[in-house]
Image: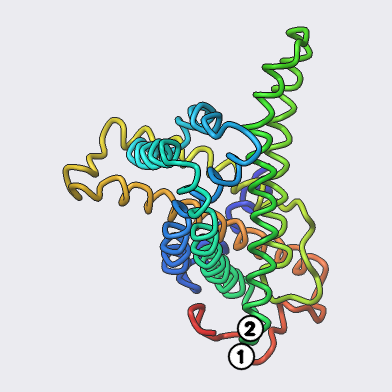
Amino acid sequence: MLARMKDYGSTFLKVWFVADRVHLGLIAAGVAFFAMFALFPALAAVIAIFGLVADPIVIQTQLELVRELIPPDAYDALFSQLENLLSARPETLTFATVLSLSVALFSARAGVAALMLGLNSVYDRPVRGGLRHILAAITMTFSLIGVALTALLMVVVAPVVIAHVPLPWRAAAVLELLRWLIAFMVLLAGLGILYRFGPNRREARPSWVTPGALVVIVLWLAASTGFSLYLSNFGRYNEVYGSIGAAAAMLMWLYISAYLILFGAALNVAIEKRGLAREGPRPTELEHPEPGSQESPLGS
């Protein structure tokens, strides 16, 4: 038992060293910056697209389900923007669809590209070439958008279907549990895509479900809930930042999320290296990085 505790302690110490070596906080700040710019255009695009097939007011109702996981100021900013979008005329939203999709995709691609640079730094891998990096970021962006839309269907659309289909209460309870389980699996799949294809690795790709991904989900739920409670009881962002208090809270929440994703990658690296040390030395990407792997995480 003591040996196992020492093993876990050694692993997390290695994660801390990796985070310090690659300046994980700085990379997470860059990812959060681009995510902030992508969030509201993406919200407008989702409202516009969803309005083509259903009543978008459903999104406003279901947003209440995740209220406890989002900082109050950030939630208020999201909810306020959502109300503005829902009160807009249909033709305005149609125009907003094209404009918002363009802005959101550009910002999302930039955020994913920054995240990929961070993953390459964590794995000590060289950055992909210019065109390869752009194409990989675009492919990754569309993959993650697909994951996000699937999660949205589970959280937003499924309750509407369940509410309009007469079912015994036991069956409804099972379906309710099932949709959250599917949403969890979708989130796990998104992290699996990032950790498997984000770093520039042609061999020894991690499995779809990694310890880092599982730890990230647990830590993200805990951190989001804790940050929300802190802002509700102690934090006074509006008093410090004035009218941009909600934006500051949102940016901080996105930073925490980005940092935890990169932290999960660092944990995967530490576990991989621990496994290699037990098996004995052999040529691997982790032990023999290609020339140029020490590039700056912001360079490309």
Q: How is the image coloured?
A: rainbow
- Say if 134 sits above or below 91 in the image: below
Question: Residue lying furthest bottom in this view?
Answer: 291
Label 2: state its secondary structure. loop
Q: What residue type is labelled 2?
A: Pro
**Which is more N-terminal, label 2 or label 1?**
2
Specify the label residue 292 is tagged with: 1
- Say if 38 sits above or below 229 in the image: below
Q: In this view, does 49 lie to the left or right of 23?
A: right
The crowd level at tag 1 (other Cα within 10 Å; few <14, some 14-19, many 20+) is few
Q: Is residue 268 left or right of residue 92?
A: right
Specify the label residue 109 is tagged with: none
Q: Which amino acid does label 1 sit on?
A: Gly
**Residue 159 x %, y %:** 65, 24
Q: Residue at x 77, y 11 (%)?
A: 167
- Pointer 1 and pointer 2: residues touching (CB < 8 Å)? yes
- Say if 56 sits above or below 146 in the image: above
Foreground pick, 40 / 125: 40
Q: Name the residue under label 2.
A: 126
Q: Which residue is drawn at 70% across and 43% down?
A: 150
The image quarter in which residue 80 lies: top left
Label 1: state its secondary structure. loop
Foreground pick, 139 / 290: 139
**Residue 219 x %, y %:** 54, 43
